Image (cartoon, grey):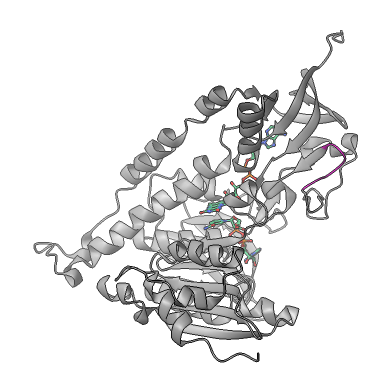
Amino acid sequence: MSSTKAPDHYDLLVIGSGEAGKFLPWMLSAKHGKKTAVIERGRIGGSCPNVACLPSKNVIHSAAIAHEVRRASAFGVSLSGIDPASLKSDMPVIKARKDAMVKDVNGFQGFFDMFGVEIIRGEGTFVGPNEIQVGGGRALTADHILICTGSRARVDARIPGLLEARPMTHIELLDLDVLPAHLIIIGGGYVGVEFAQAYARLGSHVTLVQRGDQLIPREDEDVVQALSGILAKEGVRIITSADVQSASGTNGEEVTVSIRSSPGGEEEVLRGSHILMATGRIPNTADLNLDAAGIKTTAAGHIVVDEQLRASTSVFAAGDCAGSPHFTHMGFDDFRVPSVLFTDPELARVGLTEKEARAKGVPYRLAKLPMASFLRTRTLGPGASEGFAKALIEADGERILGFTALGPGAGELLPVISLAMKLNAGYRQLADLIIAHPTMNEGLVELFLLHVPDGTS
Ligand SMILES: Cc1cc2nc3c(=O)[nH]c(=O)nc-3n(C[C@H](O)[C@H](O)[C@H](O)COP(=O)(O)OP(=O)(O)OC[C@H]3O[C@@H](n4cnc5c(N)ncnc54)[C@H](O)[C@@H]3O)c2cc1C
Ligand SMILES: NC(=O)c1ccc[n+]([C@@H]2O[C@H](COP(=O)([O-])OP(=O)(O)OC[C@H]3O[C@@H](n4cnc5c(N)ncnc54)[C@H](O)[C@@H]3O)[C@@H](O)[C@H]2O)c1
């Protein structure tokens, strides 16, 4: 029997309670008295605090501690005769620490209540341009709808034997309470590289297989070469230009992954205990019945939006599902694009790479400074001075076009550069700053004071 009850009406309905879906309804309800609701089928708060950014950084930090303890003697701290090689990672404790943090940061329901935003549990699908049904039951209408359904890990079902091997994604890896003896990671992007170093530090053998000819393809070659060298020194075996042919066995027991170095090269069979898939993301858009709202998707499944994130007259989309760069802060504001790869040292960038500048025909001057000149790194122990920072300055002016740093805590350098870029403050303004010594940011003064070649103007 069909219900005759009129749909509940809202000013704004949001599908998905992740980073992209939280702030707008919170603000509209709390500050402007609007009637808003968020529909969520899974965990409130979405991926970042539950299964992605925060839990991965928690495990990465445990791995960093393992790394530092193993080389404690280099800092003059005695392990009293304990052989560092005999130190073991206690995976149940590492997982418990991560689980406790996830529980601790998960106060989201309280925020929704506090800001007066209704949470509606269930799966939302469109039944009309302004109408959504939740779990095949409750009907809702809204003046505006915001789609923030995120993305999930891509596992290529076309690779023979892969699905049968039950490979892990980041979700299962983060829930593991045993240390993989040999972790084979497929995909050398953000997820693959961060976990490769972390698990090598925790004590796993790690093999990282990347299809393209370098890890983190978007970054410049000099940066990736330096980072790859650091990972290799820590024991990560990196195989680039390799295509996965097939897999067999069962994740958690024994697995094999056959790879062929491309194009048309040798075949090698990797034998390991676990497989992690880190080959990119698929947007969660297929089950939304977007046709009912006249909303289009790209071939990759991302919702097509304009510069204001508008997908139709009354529907908007933001975050991973809209094809924004997959960073949590993109859900919050789609037009600021810094990124930090949380390896040790961190790889941080904002603005153009050299590769991008060349491809776009943007002339630039390059200022480059080794991390050894950031004096703070000299205090941090072996290896801390590896890496460098570089800035692209416009050829005939002073604006900073891009900045990349590979160094300890490099992510913390970005806000200074972002602010200068946003305010159109030229590099000389940064060269003129007085920065406390010895902080990492102090290195920026030398970079901009002494290492910018003369311009054309
Ligand atoms: C391992 C890993 C580490 C990462 N680390 C970082 C990092 O350090 N820094 C960084 O900036 N980014 C990081 N990211 C990326 C970041 O997690 C994402 O970019 C961000 O979480 C995306 O937010 P979102 O709101 O678009 O989607 P999500 O947070 O995924 O939220 C989408 C929500 O929509 C819900 N949903 C989906 N479909 C429906 C439906 N039909 N009805 C109801 N609800 C639905 C889902 O249940 C989910 O809760 C990482 C990603 C991974 C995988
Ligand atoms: N620190 C951070 O901000 C952070 C950390 C983790 C993830 N993330 C976000 O999450 C998103 C997803 O990360 P990801 O690493 O899964 O995707 P990614 O797009 O960064 O990298 C995937 C890599 O896998 C490779 N690949 C694809 N198929 C392959 C195959 N069959 N064999 C070998 N290699 C293959 C691709 O060439 C690509 O380089 C990223 O776009 C990133 O923005 C961000």
Q: Quadrant of residue 229?
A: bottom left
Residue 436 highlighted magenta (yes or no): no
Q: Residue at point 73% right, 29% down?
A: 13
- State ligand 1's quadrant: top right
Q: Is residue 233 above or below residue 332?
A: below
State the extent of the magenta-drawn residues as a range: 309-314
- The answer to whether 354 is drawn above or below residue 419 in the figure is below
Residue 7 % position (x, y): 81, 16
Horizontally, residue 149 falls left or right of residue 428, namely right
Percent across and percent down for residue 380 are 27, 70
Report which quarter residue 32 is drawn in: top right
Residue 90 coordinates in the image, percent (x, y): 29, 48
Is residue 453 depicted above or below 146 in this figure?
Answer: below
Screen quadrant of the C terminus: bottom right
Magenta stretch: residue 311 in it? yes
Q: Residue furthest left?
A: 80
> Which residue occupies 65% across, 37% down?
24
Q: Position of residue 46 (x, y in %)?
A: 58, 38
Q: Quadrant of the N terminus?
A: top right
Residue drawn at (58%, 49%) of the image: 328
Is residue 26 in view from this perspective? yes
- The dominant secondary structure in magenta is loop
Residue in the foreground of this view, choosing between 53 and 398: 398
The mark total stands at: 0
